[in-house]
Image (cartoon, grey):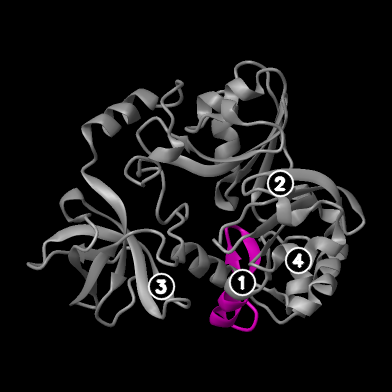
Amino acid sequence: MKNTALTNKHISLGAKMVPFAGYNMPVQYEGINAEHAAVRNSVGVFDVSHMGEFILKGENALDLIQRVTSNDASKLYDGKVQYSCLPNENGGIVDDLLVYRIDELTYMLVVNASNIEKDWNWIQKFNTRGVEMHNISDKTSLLAIQGPKAAEALQSLTDVDLASMDYYNFVKGKFAGVDNVLISATGYTGAGGFEIYFDNEHADAIWNAIFEAGKPFNIKPIGLGARDTLRLEMGFCLYGNDIDDHTSPIEAGLGWITKFSKIFTNSEALLAQKEAGVARKLVGFEMIDRGIPRHDYEIVDGEGNVIGKVTSGTQSPSLQKAIGMGYIDKAFAKEGTEIFIHIRSQKILAKIVKFPFYK
């Protein structure tokens, strides 16, 4: 199992460590609910250094990205980030990812930890025009500082005006005395904040500086457990749960990152699917009766017929109710429709709601 540059730090802070995507990762420190609340209301820090980073360079870098990703990367400018996915050839998704335009000839792709090797091999397969590719995952640390107080908590560590940074933009600059830190106004929580990328050798110093600067804001370390409840409250997809090799971006509600102004992997079939309409859709639902929906639980109608499957579910700490996501037959996908979740041989009442759950 791999460690991040901060694994020993988490252990010394008393984190409960678990194997995740081949890494030894902190799932919680003081408890998921307290950590979740810290991010929603103030500021918290996630070590997400298990994520993968690829650098693509050269005059054909954009061309390669355009051919393998669903979104239109030609719309990017220096300092702009884009959410996208890598469609496969059978209508599914290899991975979802972020595309960073560093400059006209240089891009960074940020991919999911469990898919680093798979994504690298997939992109390399289409690299027929000599794009220089570097996998910098193992030497790069990534911290997500998330919450409404994130900009205030971090401002003393950099000259970059954090409060004025637009969502999905980034700058490279000095941070906590370290040069060449990439500061990105992105995140996976819906609480605002930043993700910062830097070389592993600076991990301890940057972590310590962040917690010192954040003391007046009661900054806390946050584990992967709260990361999951936070993203689920926003209806953000998790690869391996809500999207995978067998779910199309159209079914998953990711039509907004699937641009048919260009040709990309399987774009013809996906366009046909968009035009014809899909048989099932990824929806959000909240429980009306008591019960927590879990991954792979069946969704049924009033007669008990299976009409779908839960992909993610939890007790929402912010809303104090159980929520979930799942694929369901299109006929039942309308907001307000009552459905049932099969929980331990019981039919538990739920209803379809719009994303995000937490507003």
Q: Residue at x 58, y 25 (%)?
A: 74
The residues tagged by marks 3 and 4 sit, at their Cα atoms, a distance apart of 31 Å
Marker disc for residue 152: 4
Residue 39, quarter of the rendered image: bottom right
How dense is the environment of label 1, judged by Cα within 10 Å: few (below 14), some, or many (20 and up)? many
- In this view, the mark in front (2 or 3): 3
Which badge, 4 or 1, is on the more N-terminal residue?
A: 1
Q: Secondary structure at mark 4?
A: helix
Q: Is residue 153 visible?
A: yes
Which badge, 3 or 4, is on the more N-terminal residue?
A: 4
What is the three-letter code of the residue carrying label 4?
Answer: Glu
Which badge, 4 or 2, is on the more N-terminal residue?
A: 2
Marker disc for residue 137: 2
Which badge, 3 or 1, is on the more N-terminal residue?
A: 1
Left or right: residue 177 versus residue 336 is right
Left or right: residue 340 versus residue 102 is left
Q: Mark 3–mark 1 contact, CB under 8 Å?
A: no
The residues tagged by marks 4 and 1 sit, at their Cα atoms, a distance apart of 14 Å
Furthest residue to the left?
303
Where is residue 164 shown, x and y percent of the image?
72, 52
What is the three-letter code of the residue carrying label 2?
Answer: Ser
Marker disc for residue 314: 3
Bounds of the magenta segment: 17-38
What is the three-letter code of the residue carrying label 1?
Answer: Val
Q: Secondary structure at mark 1?
A: helix
Q: Secondary structure at mark 3?
A: strand
- In this view, the mark in front (1 or 2): 1
- In this view, the mark in front (3 or 4): 4
The residues tagged by marks 1 and 2 sit, at their Cα atoms, a distance apart of 26 Å
Residue 269, quarter of the rendered image: top left
Q: Secondary structure at mark 2?
A: helix
Q: Mark 3–mark 4 contact, CB under 8 Å?
A: no
